[in-house]
Image (tube, rainbow, N blue to C red):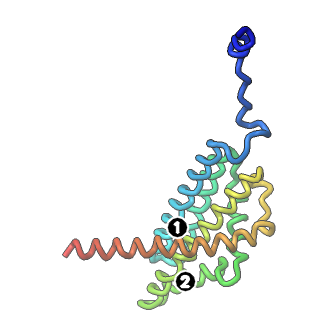
């Protein structure tokens, strides 16, 4: 009985701290941050798709780049990392310019098709929103991956992240196409409701 009483009076062992090596898997904080980052990226994809619809050639691309820079800044804040606008622009240009067929040159060309009366604007409206959304998504995912691996904007190598960027760009195209379809459906509903 005395042994039982002594055992019940012994203090319980202290729990291991959350950051100890015995903790397996992601912490609740990192899971929450990942969800916030993913939602943030999707919000910026929506903004990029909307900005790419602007009928003014090249203004649409400038607006998308500004949106992407703001996304990088907000992701940097979320992960407690420093931000540099000039490095952000450089990374955007390096990553987006390196995707064969969908690089920065392609986006500029598609944007400039809006100068062609009638059909040009329609061509730009069909493809640029998907390119803008996919690029924004991929850039966001690259930064999240880099930040989660302990990097910051000052040591991000576009060359090292290019394969991951291309993979995320493909996922982003599907997401951007869905966003664009929803926007078009909403516009049709608005027109129908107005009549």
Near-viewer residue (39 or 75): 39
From the viewer's perspective, tell me whether residue 192 is left or right of residue 61. Answer: left
From the viewer's perspective, tell me whether residue 154 is left or right of residue 77. Answer: right
Near-viewer residue (105 or 152): 152
**Residue visible at 44% across and 86% down?**
122
Q: What number is the disc on residue 112?
A: 2
Give percent across and percent down for residue 144.
67, 56
Near-viewer residue (136 or 90): 136
Q: How many marks?
A: 2
Give percent across and percent down for residue 74.
60, 51
User: Where 66 sits versus 81, above or below?
Assistant: below
**Residue visible at 62% across and 47% down?**
78
The crowding category of the residue bearing disc 2, from other C-alpha atoms within 10 Å (few below 14, some 14 to 19, many at least 20), is some
Give percent across and percent down for residue 193.
22, 72
Looking at the rendering, in which quadrant would you find the N terminus? top right
Residue 86 visible in image: no
Residue 52 visible in image: yes
The quarter of the displayed image where residue 2 is located: top right
Give percent across and percent down for residue 155.
80, 56
Q: Between marks 2 and 1, how big is the CA–CA gap? A: 17 Å
Comes first in the chain, label 2 or label 1? 1
**Residue visible at 50% across and 73% down?**
52
Residue picked out by circle 1: 48
């Amino acid at each position: 009985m005395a042994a039982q009483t002594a055992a019940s009076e012994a203090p319980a062992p202290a729990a291991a701290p959350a950051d100890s090596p015995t903790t397996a898997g992601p912490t609740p904080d990192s899971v929450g941050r990942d969800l916030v980052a993913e939602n943030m990226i999707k919000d910026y994809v929506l903004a990029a798709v909307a900005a790419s619809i602007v009928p003014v050639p090249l203004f649409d691309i400038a607006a998308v780049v500004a949106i992407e820079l703001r996304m990088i800044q907000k992701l940097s804040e979320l992960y407690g990392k420093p931000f540099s606008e000039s490095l952000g622009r450089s990374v955007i240009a390096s990553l987006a310019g390196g995707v064969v067929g969908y690089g920065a040159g392609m986006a500029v060309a598609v944007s400039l098709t809006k100068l062609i009366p009638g059909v040009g604007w329609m061509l730009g409206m069909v493809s640029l929103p998907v390119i803008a959304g996919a690029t924004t998504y991929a850039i966001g995912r690259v930064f999240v991956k880099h930040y989660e691996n302990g990097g910051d904007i000052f040591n991000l190598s576009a060359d090292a992240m290019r394969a991951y960027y291309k993979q995320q760009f493909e996922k982003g195209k599907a997401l951007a196409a869905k966003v664009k379809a929803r926007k078009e459906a909403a516009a049709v509903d608005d027109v129908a409701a107005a009549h």
